[in-house]
Image (cartoon, rainbow, N blue to C red):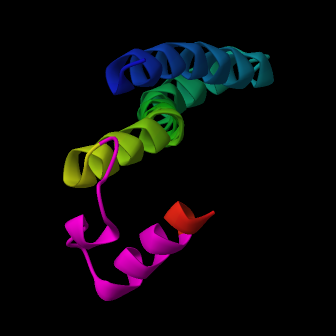
Amino acid sequence: MGYSVVQFSVYGYSTEYLTWYFSSKTDAKNELEKEQISDKVDVRSGVISFASGAIAGICGTLVTYPCDLCRTIFAARGLFPIAASNVTWSHHTTHLVSKSQED
């Protein structure tokens, strides 16, 4: 599943939910309050857009990062490494890979 699929799906759902949530909180009783609320709606739409984007970015990263990490590791050392010395990241990583091959 791609990052964009997750991000745009979550962005759409979170925008709808936040818009519904904040619109249900505003019950104007007279015209003066409606004018004050219309000024707040412009600011609120920016806040909703920002919050939805942040939520979507976090969800997209959480869903796709593990797969991207595995893909990077396989590209760096191969799916079936011959020896731990093929891993050229660092001594610590080489040590961890050699330990996992012993198990």
Residue at 25% across, 67% down: 87
Q: Which residues are magenta?
A: 79-99
Residue at 22% across, 45% down: 75
* Vertical comparison of 20 with 103: above or below: above
Residue 42 position in % (x across, y down)? 42, 28
Q: Quadrant of residue 90?
A: bottom left
Query: Is 97 covered by the magenta stretch?
Result: yes
Residue at 67% across, 25% down: 33
Residue 50 position in % (x across, y down)? 43, 39
Q: Nearer the viewer, residue 69 or 80?
A: 80
Quarter that holds the N terminus? top left
Query: Is 44 covered by the magenta stretch?
Result: no
Is residue 61 visible in the rendered structure shown here?
A: no
Quarter that holds the C terminus? bottom right
State how many labels appear: 0
Residue 87 shown left or right of residue 35 in the figure: left
Residue 79 shown left or right of residue 55 in the figure: left
Residue 96 position in % (x across, y down)? 48, 74
Residue at 51% across, 39% down: 51
Q: Nearer the viewer, residue 51 or 33?
A: 51
Is residue 4 visible in the rendered structure shown here?
A: yes
Residue 7 position in % (x across, y down)? 42, 25
